[in-house]
Structure formats: structure tokens, C-alpha cells
Amino acid sequence: MQLKHVIIIYKAGHPLSKKWAETCARQLEALGAQVLVGPSGPKDNPYPVFLSSINQRIDLGVVLGGDGTTLAAARHLAPVGTPILAVNVGGHLGFLTEPFELFRETEQVWARLIEDRYAVQRRMMLQAYLLEGDRIMPTVISEQFLCLNEICIKPASVDRMPTSILEMEVDGEIVDQYHGDGLIVATPTGSTCYNASANGPIVHSGMDAIAITPICPLSLSTRPIVMPPGSVISVWPLGDVDLYTKLWTDGVIASQIWPGQRVNISMADCQAKFIILQSDQSFYQTLREKLHWGGTRIHYDPGAMN
């Protein structure tokens, strides 16, 4: 990997994350890299400036924070193909990040990247558009909305807890009407997040699939469903005349949905690319550690069985 153009994103308002970002910037500049550093958070979005300031390919995005900081990086950097090195500095669960212990000796990390001693994990993303007009030939009326975890369609209000009625089609065929708190459409990466909290299925991160999970449905027969990655999912809010229904991407509000509009969701035409430093990364180990599963009572060394 070349390290000519690097961006470093740290968790806004977190002193330790900022300190490590400054240290990394000095080291990379000493290696001849052009480096841009900025905070990322609910009120900070450095990516438009980063992407417009560097008119060449960005070789690496270093993300120092937690899963929320990493999700924002994926939404902005996946379309331009920038690989992400995400490190848990100030995060909580750290599902998407490398452990800080592997990053502490940062100069060794840069050497590994330059010498191509790392792995790249590609993760499926979803895209969504708002449409209106004829069901057969609708008109796209919004920008593209990307997510790495999930797209959520649900009502929101400051003074009440509204429910929703959402009609869903898959590939042009009506599947169901969901009456409840909303609908989650998740990637395998996002299946362990909000989707899992809503009793949706956990999908292996190495798969391409789409999990659809209703949130607190009022019908006991309503169940989650896993769809092939090539599916096109269309969702219509029914009966909402007060603009309660919102479209959310990775927990961030993306748009209101007006009466007569629908949301089309499909697999994105880009993937998030994560740099992996761990030599023994395991999806099941991550589940056991992050979700506090019991695991086996007998621990053994697989290498000793050869």
C-alpha cells in the first residue's frame, strides 16, 4: 500500500482519540504522506472538505473512535474506494474496529501497511432512494442514501409515540403490511446491532444478504425474513398525513417521507473495505466477546490438535 494521501478521523470531543490522531499525523508526514485530520461526530462532518481538498486517490482512512465513527466513515469513503483502518479509541462495543492493543505501536502499523502485511475485509452496504409517482415507472426524487448497518423506516415525533403502517414489496410482489413501530432493513454487518435488538436474525458477516425485521409488530404472526442480496425492497408508509415517517441510515436521520412517496432499498454498488491487522480474527469470537455469550466450557488450542 502507498501512503501518499491519508485522512485521519477522530471521535469528536474525545481527547485521547484526538491525541492519537495528532501522533499518527506527525508520523505519516515524516514518511512523506499528505495528511488531513478532523473530528467526526453528530455535529462534525469532515468528509466533504477531505474529499474536495484531495483531488487524487485517498490511499487510507484512519478512523480513531468507535462503531459510530466507523459507520460514518464507511458511508463517505466506500463510494470512492478508500480502505479504512478503524481502531477502537474511545468506543464501546467495537464490533467494527481493530483492538487498540494492535495499534499502540503505530510506526510498526505503518510499516505493515507499506509492506502489504494485512488483510482487507469487504462488507456489503445498502442504498436507498425516495421515489414518487406511478408504481411501474416511478421518479427518483432524492439523493442516494448509503448505510453499512441498517436502513430504518419508522415514525418519530417530539410529543407522542406514533405507530406506522408500512406496506412492503420485494421485487414487485407484495409481501406484507407491517403495523407497529417501524421496519429495519439490515446488512449482515448490521444484523448484530439494532436488528438483533429487535429480535432479528444474526447473519454471518461473510455473507451477502438482506435481513428485514419489523419493530414491535402488533401481529404475533409477523416475523423477520432474510432476502437474497439482489432483492429490491419497496416500502410505502400508509395513512401518515402528519409527516411522522422518517428514513434513517445507521441511526442518523436521512429524510422525511411525504405521503405518496416510497423507499426503494437494494444492495449498494459499493462496498466498505476494512484493513484487518488481527491474524486470528473470528466472527464467532467477536460474537462471544461483544455479546457476552458463554461459549464453551472447555478451552483448547486448535494448533495443538495437529
Image (cartoon, helix red, strand yellow):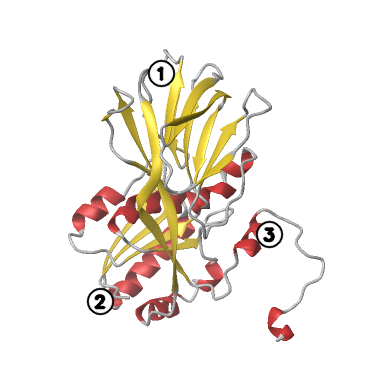
Number of marks in the image? Answer: 3
Q: Amino acid at mark 2?
A: Gly
The reply to whether the C-beta atoms of the residues labelled 2 and 1 are less than 8 Å apart is: no
Label 2 element class: loop
Q: Residues within 10 Å of mark 1 (few under 14, many from 20)?
A: some
Q: Which mark is residue 32?
A: 2
Instruction: Determine the residue positioned at 82% across, 66% down.
Output: 297
Q: Amino acid at mark 3?
A: Arg
N-term-proximal mark, 2 vs 1: 2
Give the Cα separation between the discs numbered 2 and 1: 52 Å
Q: Which mark is residue 290?
A: none
Residue 139 appears in which quarter of the rendering? top left
List the residue tagged with mark 3: 288
Label 3 element class: helix
Q: Amino acid at mark 1?
A: Leu
Q: Where does residue 191 sit, x and y in percent of width and height?
A: 56, 47
Instruction: Determine the residue positioned at 48% across, 25% down.
Output: 167
